[in-house]
Image (spheres, grey):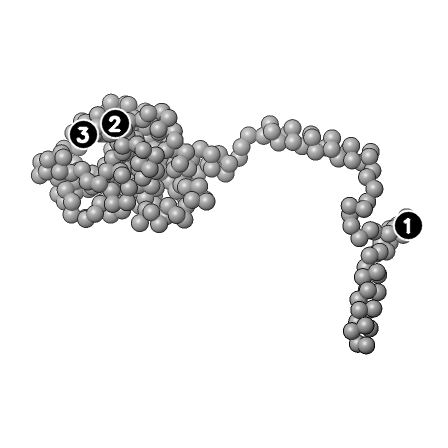
Amino acid sequence: MRRDEDAESAEAEANDAAEVVVVTPAQVAVVPASLLDVEVDEALSNEMQAAADQAVAEAETIPAGPAEEAEADFTIQAVASYLRDARVRVAIAISPTGDDGSTATVMLAREMAEAGRKVILLDMTGSACPTRLMAARKDLAGITDLLCGEAAFADTIHPDRLSDADIIPQGNCDVRQAMRGADRLAMITDALADVYDIVIVECGPANAEGVARISRQGDHEIILSAPHPDEADLAGIMAAFEKAGYADLVLMSGLRLAESEARDRSAA
């Protein structure tokens, strides 16, 4: 008996809910249970369609905003594609904020290696971040040993522990002593470019004058590796490089969001 009473009560409530009385200034109108039951107002429908078509036409003429451009143009994947398509032989990466930018450059090298390019990264940072991420050991001979004459060229080239890329690590010799031979860097990168599809030189937070030591031939691209770019800082850096004769810098701001978590693991 109790269940019958509950069923009748529920049915009565459902019937009441099917028709809701809405009071308007002009009249009392009944709202149907489904909006699909509403008869189409042809005049209103045509007016709304015309407005929608106008909005679409206007949207197509609006240029992409900064977020859309960053996704399309400044990701690691986009920069890797650009370097491949342009057949760039030497790319010089500048990381204004330090290790986070250097880590992105390591990801760039691995991205290109994964795509089948023969790539080597030259660690010219002070922190040795790329060396820590790529080399099997921290004490491997590297660029400082080469510049100081303590190691042969072939002995400074080592495989990346997580990809098919190669690395010339920072090395073990005194950095200041090694940089006395910095004028040889352009010759070293040219020699590497004869063997590899692309040479990526990670310089850390270097200035335009420092980059000039590597780029005297002018046949290169300069990448501004800034995973979390600050517009004011970037403007200042670009102005400084432009003043030194480097007008075209390639901004690299990071990974596509869908892939960032997986690549963060691979960078480690």
- Identify the image quadrant of residue 14: bottom right
Vertical relation: 27 (above or below) 208 = below
Horizontal side of residue 52 vs 187, given as left or right: right
- Kindly tell me whether residue 221 is visible in this rendering: yes
Could you tell me the amino acid type at mark 2? Answer: Ser
Could you tell me the amino acid type at mark 1? Answer: Gln
Give the residue at mark 2.
215
- Kindly tell me whether residue 148 is visible in this rendering: no
Disc marking residue 188 = 3
Asked whether the beta carbons under mark 1 and mark 2 sit within 8 Å of each other, the answer is no
Which SS class for mark 2? loop
Residue neighbourhood size for the residue with mark 2, other residues' Cα within 10 Å, grouped as few (<14), some (14–19), many (≥20):
many
Asked whether the beta carbons under mark 3 and mark 2 sit within 8 Å of each other, the answer is no
Residue neighbourhood size for the residue with mark 3, other residues' Cα within 10 Å, grouped as few (<14), some (14–19), many (≥20):
some
Vertical relation: 28 (above or below) 231 = below
Tell which of 57 and 8 is nearer to you: 8
Identify the residue at horizontal 83%, vertical 68% (top origin).
8
Identify the residue at horizontal 41%, vertical 45% (top origin).
260
Could you tell me the amino acid type at mark 3? Answer: Ile
Give the residue at mark 1.
27
Q: Earlier in the sequence, mark 1 or mark 3?
A: 1
Image quadrant occupied by the N terminus: bottom right
Tell which of 181 and 30 is nearer to you: 30
Position in image of residue 84 (x %, y %): 35, 28
Give me the C-alpha separation between circle 3 and circle 2. Answer: 11 Å
Give me the C-alpha separation between circle 1 and circle 2. Answer: 80 Å
Horizontal side of residue 17 vs 264, given as left or right: right
Q: Nearer the viewer, mark 1 or mark 2?
A: 1
Disc marking residue 209 = none
Residue neighbourhood size for the residue with mark 1, other residues' Cα within 10 Å, grouped as few (<14), some (14–19), many (≥20):
few
Tell which of 114 and 188 is nearer to you: 114
